[in-house]
Amino acid sequence: MKVQFLGSGDAFGSGGRFQTCIRLESGASQILLDCGASSLIAMRRFGVDPQAIDAVILSHLHGDHFGGVPFMILDGQFKRRTRPLVVVGPPGVEARVLLTMEALFPGSTRVERKFDTRFVELTDRLPVAVGPMNVTGFEVSHASGAPPFALRVAGEGKIVTYSGDTEWTDSLIDAARGADLFVAEALFYDKRVRYHLDLTTLLQHRARLDCRRLVLTHMGEDMLARLDGLGVEGAEDGKQLLV
Protein backbone atom coordinates (compact mmCIF):
# COMPACT_ATOMS: atom_id res chain seq x y z
CA MET A 1 0.00 0.00 0.00
CA LYS A 2 1.29 3.46 -0.90
CA VAL A 3 0.86 6.32 1.55
CA GLN A 4 1.31 10.01 0.77
CA PHE A 5 0.89 12.93 3.14
CA LEU A 6 -0.81 15.63 1.10
CA GLY A 7 -1.33 17.69 4.24
CA SER A 8 0.34 17.19 7.62
CA GLY A 9 -0.42 20.46 9.38
CA ASP A 10 -2.71 21.57 12.15
CA ALA A 11 -5.85 23.66 11.73
CA PHE A 12 -3.91 26.93 11.50
CA GLY A 13 -1.22 26.13 8.93
CA SER A 14 1.68 25.96 11.39
CA GLY A 15 4.97 25.69 9.53
CA GLY A 16 3.23 26.62 6.28
CA ARG A 17 1.76 23.12 6.05
CA PHE A 18 -1.49 22.10 4.42
CA GLN A 19 -4.33 20.81 6.58
CA THR A 20 -4.75 17.10 7.18
CA CYS A 21 -5.06 14.87 4.12
CA ILE A 22 -3.47 11.43 3.68
CA ARG A 23 -3.70 9.55 0.38
CA LEU A 24 -3.72 5.74 0.37
CA GLU A 25 -3.32 3.78 -2.85
CA SER A 26 -4.11 0.07 -3.08
CA GLY A 27 -4.12 -1.43 -6.54
CA ALA A 28 -6.23 0.81 -8.76
CA SER A 29 -8.07 2.36 -5.82
CA GLN A 30 -7.20 5.66 -4.10
CA ILE A 31 -8.74 7.02 -0.93
CA LEU A 32 -8.14 10.04 1.27
CA LEU A 33 -8.04 9.93 5.04
CA ASP A 34 -9.46 13.34 5.93
CA CYS A 35 -9.70 16.20 3.50
CA GLY A 36 -9.02 19.55 5.14
CA ALA A 37 -10.06 22.83 3.54
CA SER A 38 -6.68 23.22 1.79
CA SER A 39 -6.62 19.68 0.36
CA LEU A 40 -7.57 20.50 -3.23
CA ILE A 41 -4.63 22.93 -3.36
CA ALA A 42 -2.35 20.23 -1.92
CA MET A 43 -3.49 17.72 -4.53
CA ARG A 44 -2.66 20.18 -7.30
CA ARG A 45 0.72 20.92 -5.68
CA PHE A 46 1.74 17.25 -5.56
CA GLY A 47 0.31 16.12 -8.89
CA VAL A 48 -2.63 14.12 -7.56
CA ASP A 49 -5.72 14.08 -9.76
CA PRO A 50 -8.82 14.70 -7.60
CA GLN A 51 -10.93 12.90 -10.20
CA ALA A 52 -8.99 9.68 -9.48
CA ILE A 53 -9.96 9.63 -5.79
CA ASP A 54 -12.56 6.93 -5.13
CA ALA A 55 -13.42 7.75 -1.53
CA VAL A 56 -12.81 10.17 1.31
CA ILE A 57 -12.80 8.74 4.84
CA LEU A 58 -13.35 11.36 7.53
CA SER A 59 -12.17 10.93 11.11
CA HIS A 60 -14.31 13.78 12.43
CA LEU A 61 -16.24 16.82 11.32
CA HIS A 62 -13.96 19.80 11.95
CA GLY A 63 -13.20 22.06 9.00
CA ASP A 64 -9.48 21.26 8.88
CA HIS A 65 -10.43 17.60 8.40
CA PHE A 66 -13.53 17.68 6.20
CA GLY A 67 -13.68 21.21 4.77
CA GLY A 68 -12.11 20.18 1.46
CA VAL A 69 -14.94 17.79 0.57
CA PRO A 70 -17.29 20.50 -0.79
CA PHE A 71 -14.47 21.78 -3.01
CA MET A 72 -13.77 18.24 -4.28
CA ILE A 73 -17.43 17.73 -5.14
CA LEU A 74 -17.69 21.07 -6.95
CA ASP A 75 -14.38 20.48 -8.74
CA GLY A 76 -15.75 17.16 -9.97
CA GLN A 77 -18.89 18.90 -11.18
CA PHE A 78 -16.98 21.51 -13.18
CA LYS A 79 -14.50 18.94 -14.54
CA ARG A 80 -17.41 16.69 -15.60
CA ARG A 81 -16.36 13.85 -13.34
CA THR A 82 -18.19 10.57 -13.92
CA ARG A 83 -16.36 8.38 -11.37
CA PRO A 84 -18.52 7.82 -8.26
CA LEU A 85 -17.31 9.41 -5.03
CA VAL A 86 -17.91 7.78 -1.65
CA VAL A 87 -17.68 9.89 1.50
CA VAL A 88 -17.42 7.88 4.71
CA GLY A 89 -17.57 9.61 8.08
CA PRO A 90 -19.23 10.05 11.45
CA PRO A 91 -23.01 10.03 11.87
CA GLY A 92 -24.45 13.15 10.27
CA VAL A 93 -21.66 13.43 7.71
CA GLU A 94 -23.98 13.98 4.74
CA ALA A 95 -25.94 16.75 6.42
CA ARG A 96 -22.75 18.50 7.56
CA VAL A 97 -21.14 18.38 4.11
CA LEU A 98 -24.28 19.62 2.36
CA LEU A 99 -24.78 22.39 4.91
CA THR A 100 -21.18 23.50 4.35
CA MET A 101 -21.61 23.44 0.58
CA GLU A 102 -24.66 25.68 0.89
CA ALA A 103 -22.83 28.07 3.22
CA LEU A 104 -19.89 28.38 0.84
CA PHE A 105 -21.72 28.18 -2.50
CA PRO A 106 -25.49 28.77 -2.12
CA GLY A 107 -27.54 26.57 -4.43
CA SER A 108 -24.69 24.14 -5.10
CA THR A 109 -26.42 21.15 -3.49
CA ARG A 110 -29.34 21.42 -5.90
CA VAL A 111 -27.23 21.14 -9.06
CA GLU A 112 -27.47 17.79 -10.85
CA ARG A 113 -24.04 16.20 -11.23
CA LYS A 114 -22.82 13.53 -13.65
CA PHE A 115 -21.31 11.44 -10.86
CA ASP A 116 -22.89 9.68 -7.91
CA THR A 117 -21.94 10.97 -4.47
CA ARG A 118 -22.69 8.42 -1.77
CA PHE A 119 -22.41 9.04 1.97
CA VAL A 120 -21.75 6.22 4.44
CA GLU A 121 -21.81 6.61 8.23
CA LEU A 122 -19.25 4.93 10.45
CA THR A 123 -20.27 2.85 13.43
CA ASP A 124 -17.80 2.11 16.22
CA ARG A 125 -15.68 -0.96 15.30
CA LEU A 126 -17.88 -2.03 12.40
CA PRO A 127 -15.83 -2.50 9.17
CA VAL A 128 -16.94 -0.78 5.97
CA ALA A 129 -15.82 -2.04 2.55
CA VAL A 130 -14.42 0.76 0.37
CA GLY A 131 -13.33 -0.80 -2.92
CA PRO A 132 -10.51 -3.26 -2.14
CA MET A 133 -9.97 -1.77 1.31
CA ASN A 134 -11.78 -2.26 4.60
CA VAL A 135 -12.14 0.72 6.92
CA THR A 136 -12.94 0.43 10.62
CA GLY A 137 -13.60 3.36 12.92
CA PHE A 138 -12.66 3.29 16.60
CA GLU A 139 -14.41 5.96 18.62
CA VAL A 140 -11.99 8.36 20.32
CA SER A 141 -12.26 11.59 22.33
CA HIS A 142 -12.52 14.87 20.43
CA ALA A 143 -15.50 17.23 20.65
CA SER A 144 -16.61 17.94 17.07
CA GLY A 145 -20.40 17.78 17.07
CA ALA A 146 -20.46 14.09 16.10
CA PRO A 147 -18.63 10.97 17.29
CA PRO A 148 -14.93 11.14 16.26
CA PHE A 149 -12.97 8.10 15.11
CA ALA A 150 -9.48 6.74 14.72
CA LEU A 151 -9.38 5.02 11.33
CA ARG A 152 -7.96 1.58 10.57
CA VAL A 153 -7.56 0.72 6.89
CA ALA A 154 -6.70 -2.79 5.69
CA GLY A 155 -5.74 -3.62 2.11
CA GLU A 156 -3.19 -5.71 0.20
CA GLY A 157 -2.39 -7.55 3.43
CA LYS A 158 -1.30 -4.28 5.07
CA ILE A 159 -2.84 -2.16 7.83
CA VAL A 160 -2.60 1.61 8.21
CA THR A 161 -4.08 3.27 11.29
CA TYR A 162 -4.65 7.00 11.74
CA SER A 163 -5.52 8.50 15.12
CA GLY A 164 -7.49 11.50 13.89
CA ASP A 165 -7.63 14.19 16.58
CA THR A 166 -8.03 12.84 20.10
CA GLU A 167 -6.72 12.95 23.62
CA TRP A 168 -5.24 9.66 24.81
CA THR A 169 -7.77 6.84 24.92
CA ASP A 170 -7.22 3.09 25.04
CA SER A 171 -9.22 2.82 21.81
CA LEU A 172 -5.96 3.76 20.09
CA ILE A 173 -4.40 0.52 21.34
CA ASP A 174 -7.09 -1.51 19.62
CA ALA A 175 -6.99 0.60 16.45
CA ALA A 176 -3.20 0.30 16.13
CA ARG A 177 -2.94 -3.40 16.99
CA GLY A 178 -0.86 -5.16 14.34
CA ALA A 179 -0.69 -2.07 12.12
CA ASP A 180 2.18 -1.71 9.69
CA LEU A 181 1.91 2.07 10.08
CA PHE A 182 0.29 4.19 12.78
CA VAL A 183 -0.09 7.87 11.90
CA ALA A 184 -0.67 9.73 15.16
CA GLU A 185 -1.49 13.29 16.03
CA ALA A 186 1.10 15.11 18.14
CA LEU A 187 -0.13 18.68 18.36
CA PHE A 188 2.21 19.62 21.23
CA TYR A 189 5.43 18.28 22.73
CA ASP A 190 4.39 18.03 26.38
CA LYS A 191 1.50 20.46 26.79
CA ARG A 192 -1.61 18.50 27.70
CA VAL A 193 -4.75 19.92 26.14
CA ARG A 194 -8.14 18.30 26.28
CA TYR A 195 -9.11 16.44 23.09
CA HIS A 196 -5.57 16.44 21.63
CA LEU A 197 -2.44 14.29 21.88
CA ASP A 198 0.99 15.52 22.88
CA LEU A 199 4.18 13.61 22.09
CA THR A 200 5.12 12.99 25.72
CA THR A 201 1.81 11.27 26.43
CA LEU A 202 1.99 9.29 23.21
CA LEU A 203 5.49 8.00 24.00
CA GLN A 204 4.43 7.04 27.52
CA HIS A 205 2.03 4.59 25.87
CA ARG A 206 4.33 3.58 22.98
CA ALA A 207 5.01 0.10 24.37
CA ARG A 208 1.27 -0.59 24.37
CA LEU A 209 0.94 0.32 20.71
CA ASP A 210 1.53 -2.84 18.69
CA CYS A 211 2.49 -1.12 15.45
CA ARG A 212 5.59 -1.53 13.31
CA ARG A 213 6.06 2.14 12.44
CA LEU A 214 4.91 5.35 14.08
CA VAL A 215 4.74 8.64 12.16
CA LEU A 216 3.61 11.91 13.75
CA THR A 217 1.30 14.40 12.07
CA HIS A 218 -0.95 17.41 12.87
CA MET A 219 1.95 19.12 14.64
CA GLY A 220 1.78 22.68 15.93
CA GLU A 221 4.60 25.22 16.11
CA ASP A 222 5.83 23.85 19.43
CA MET A 223 6.37 20.36 17.96
CA LEU A 224 7.76 21.55 14.64
CA ALA A 225 10.42 23.65 16.39
CA ARG A 226 11.67 20.58 18.30
CA LEU A 227 11.12 17.83 15.76
CA ASP A 228 14.67 17.48 14.41
CA GLY A 229 16.10 16.65 17.82
CA LEU A 230 13.44 14.27 19.09
CA GLY A 231 14.46 11.06 17.33
CA VAL A 232 10.90 10.42 16.13
CA GLU A 233 9.58 10.26 12.58
CA GLY A 234 7.38 13.11 11.48
CA ALA A 235 5.18 13.55 8.45
CA GLU A 236 5.69 16.42 6.04
CA ASP A 237 3.66 17.61 3.08
CA GLY A 238 4.38 15.47 0.02
CA LYS A 239 6.15 12.69 1.93
CA GLN A 240 5.52 9.23 0.50
CA LEU A 241 5.79 5.84 2.22
CA LEU A 242 5.41 2.24 1.12
CA VAL A 243 3.98 -0.11 3.73
Image (tube, grey):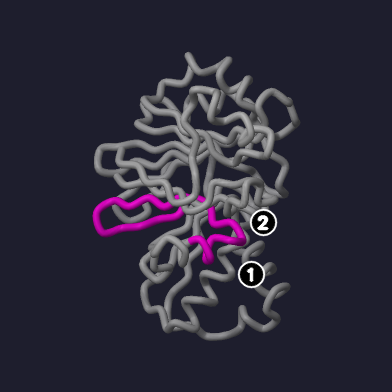
> Does 9 appear in magenta?
no
Q: Amino acid at mark 1?
A: Leu
Separation of residues labelled 1 and 2 (CA atoms): 13 Å
Of 166 and 229, nearer the camera is 229
> Does 23 appear in magenta?
yes
Give me the residue at 45% from left, 48% from top.
5
Asked whether the beta carbons under mark 1 and mark 2 sit within 8 Å of each other, the answer is no
Of 162 and 191, nearer the camera is 191
Instruction: Please state the horizontal and vertical placement of residue 39, each as a whole percent of the image.
Output: 54, 60
Instruction: Please state the horizontal and vertical placement of residue 129, each as a whole percent of the image.
Output: 37, 50
Crowding around mark 1 (Cα neighbors within 10 Å: few <14, some 14 to 19, many 20+) is some
Q: Which quadrant of the rendered structure holds the C terminus?
A: top left
Q: Amino acid at mark 2?
A: Gly
User: Which residue has dot 1 on it?
Assistant: 98
Tag 1, which secondary structure? helix
Q: Is residue 101 above or below residue 236?
A: below
Of 174 and 240, nearer the camera is 240
Mark 1 or 2: the one toward you: 2
Tag 2, which secondary structure? helix
Give me the residue at 35% from left, 42% from top.
241
Relative side of 141 to 23, left or right:
right
Q: Which tag, 1 or 2, sits closer to the chain's start?
A: 2
User: Which residue has dot 2 on it?
Assistant: 63
Relative side of 241 to 156, left or right:
right
Residues shaded magenta: 22-42
Crowding around mark 2 (Cα neighbors within 10 Å: few <14, some 14 to 19, many 20+) is some
Give me the residue at 44% from left, 51% from top.
238
Of 149 and 46, nearer the camera is 46
Q: Is residue 172 above or below residue 30?
A: above
Q: Is residue 189 above or below residue 107?
A: above
